[in-house]
Amino acid sequence: MPPHTVMSCRKTKKVGVYRPDSPYSQEECEVIIQKLELFLDGQLHSKERAEVERLITDCEYCAEQYKLEKRLRQLLARRWHNLHQEAQQIAQSVWQRLRQSFSG
Amino acid sequence: MEIRTRGRKPKKMPEMTPEQKAAYDALFEREVMPHASSIYHFALRLVNDREVARDLMQETLFRAYRFLYRYKPSTNAKAWLFRILRNTFINHYRKASKQPYSLEEHNENSLYDAEDIYAYHNYQDPVEGLFGDEVTNALHQLPEDFRTIVILADVEGLSYKEISQVLRIPVGTIRSRLHRARKILRELLIDYAASHGYELPED
């Protein structure tokens, strides 16, 4: 098995290594990786979506970048569920005061 | 029903009959109150301080009630509320950073407690266990404009178009700022992501 080569000229930090035995060239992977953000944002047309889906299914390196992008978003999207009740209490308190303040 | 606003001409809400007032209140309850958690969450992410977020939320709800007559029912209430919140944050934060806070300037009919939204001195004082994580720290390393867009997109799940409505900037600008912000976050969080569930491949 040929040695793995780290991608060169990376514009952004990436995980994993490009595998020369991949069915896709490094350039093809780079093009797809650039589209991952728009892919996850649902901003790609069906043809481009299909292209990205194909590479993240077939190419281990692209799949790793995809998993990282997704993981980062999951971390950011993590909500403080325990604050729901507090938010409701604040809102109810304000609402009560609003009704009193503007009651005529 | 006259309302004094800081540094602005006093605003008047429309005169309303009791029936209209009841309908106005019902609209507020129906369109605004369901978004309380999102407002609070956005505020917390934005300011990273529980007390300030609480006050920011109160101010947002207050303004939403005051200007509800301008809101078109069944449109995007969440985006509308986020816009109010963000504008409130920007206006008062900028003012607070330029001049010391004065209680005398504050609205006499204040809806707030003594600890006030404009006292941004505690701005960077995170509440232990809630805000001190890597993700929040990374978010707060972003410039405010970038941070807001990331929160709206990745935390609140708004579309580019909705973010554009909230911030009143073109979709193309949203896209490019979001890209740059995520690039910074990726650099900051890649190791954290790897150590919290994302398994790096074995060579």
Image (spheres, rainbow, N blue to C red):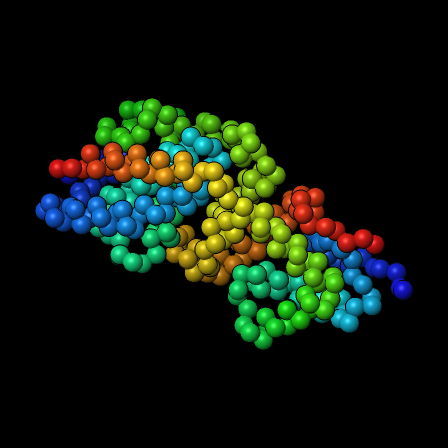
Nearer the observer, B155 or A8: B155
Res B127 seen here: yes
Q: x%, y% of residue B95?
A: 38, 34
Q: In the current view of this chain or complex, which residue is farthest to the left?
A: B17
Q: Position of residue B77 (x, y in %)?
A: 33, 53
Say above or below: B151 vs A66. Answer: above
Exactly how many numbered labels are in the figure? 0
What x and y, as percent, mark residue B85? 37, 43
Q: Quadrant of the C terminus of chain B?
A: bottom right
Q: Depth check: give the residue in front, B88 or B152.
A: B152
Which residue is painted at 28% across and 31% down in the image?
B111
Asked whether, in this view, residue B184 is left or right of residue A62, the answer is left
Q: Give the residue displayed 47% in from the left and 27% down from the top.
A: B122
Asked whether residue B83 is in view, the answer is: no
Quarter location, residue A63: bottom right
Q: Going 10% across and 47% down the picture, which residue do you hit?
A: B17
Q: Residue placed farthest to the bottom in the image?
A: A47
Residue positioned 67% across, 44% down in the render = B196
Residue A27 image point, x, y percent: 73, 68
B98 is higher (above) or lower (below) than B69: above
Tell whether A90 sits left or right of B159: left
Image position of A7 with respect to B12: above or below: below
Q: Quadrant of the N terminus of chain B?
A: top left
A30 relative to B122 in the view: left or right = right
